[in-house]
Image (spheres, grey):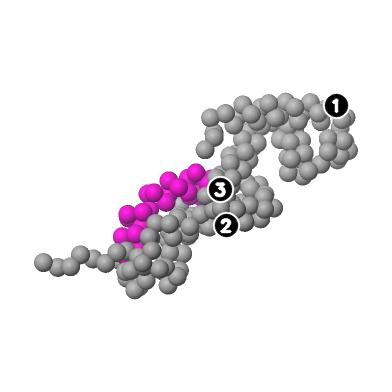
Amino acid sequence: MSDPPAPVGERLVAGDERALEECYQRYGPAVRGYLRRFVPPPDVDDVLQDTFLDVWRCRGQLDPGRRFEPWLFAIARRRAIDSLRRRRGVVDVAVVRDLMGEDGDQLAEQLAWAAEVRAALAQMPAEQREAIELAYFGQLTQREIAERLGIPLGTVKARVSRGLRRLATLMEGRAL
């Protein structure tokens, strides 16, 4: 009778490429599901691939005496954040920078929420979206928005008000 194989983490640290394949087969679906919560659908498979490439590249940093899954999902979270940073218009880099000091789980949830808000904004009429983005992401007053867009202040107020109602409707049912 042969000895059972060493845990996947130990074999990764030792440089066993079959351990990486086993890791991908065993954990790939769960990591993909996790990434789907945070990354736009077209980017999920690329981020998944980057995650497992980092698992291989960083295997020397893995402590085989500790649980493997938290280490793997920490890498996935970092790759998701990197993906959101690169993706213009999904999550403002300043928002990511402000969140970096917080707990990783809270950070991931907030990034996912920000991505959901951006996705909902993308479904809105351009005039409403522009007014909301200038107010909340550009931090402009309604008067400053009116000046920048060359439209009456009342029009800005109406666009923001209607836009926020529409955004609330679009966000219903999207809560994580």
The residue pinned by badge 3 equals 106
Splitting the image into 4 quarters, where does residue 6 fall? bottom left
Marks 1 and 2, how far apart in space?
39 Å
Instruction: Of the two numbered discs 2 and 3 on the same chain, state the one appearing first in sequence.
Output: 2
For mark 1, does the 10 Å Cα neighbourhood hold few (<14), some (14 to 19), or many (20 or more) residues? few
Q: Could you tell me how far apart the alpha carbons at marks 3 and 1 are, in whole angstroms? A: 38 Å
In the image, 154 versus 61, the foreground residue is 61
Residue 28 among those drawn in magenta? yes
Whether residue 84 can be seen here: yes
In the drawing, does residue 145 fall left or right of residue 75?
Answer: right
**Label 1: which residue?**
154
- Kindly indicate whether the residue at mark 3 contacts the one at mark 2 (C-beta within 8 angstroms): no
Mark 3 belongs to which amino acid? Gln
Query: Could you say which quadrant of the image residue 138 lies in?
Result: top right
Q: Which residue in the structure is indicated by mark 2?
A: 82
In the image, which is nearer the foreground, mark 3 or mark 1?
3
Estimate the x, y position of residue 106 in percent, counting from the top left: 56, 48
Prevalent SS, magenta region: helix
161 inside magenta stretch: no
**Viewer-nearest of discs 2 and 3:** 3
Relative to residue 169, is residue 92 depicted above or below?
A: below
Percent coordinates x, y for residue 71 in the rendering: 44, 60
Span colored in magenta = 19-44
The answer to whether one can see residue 149 in this image is no
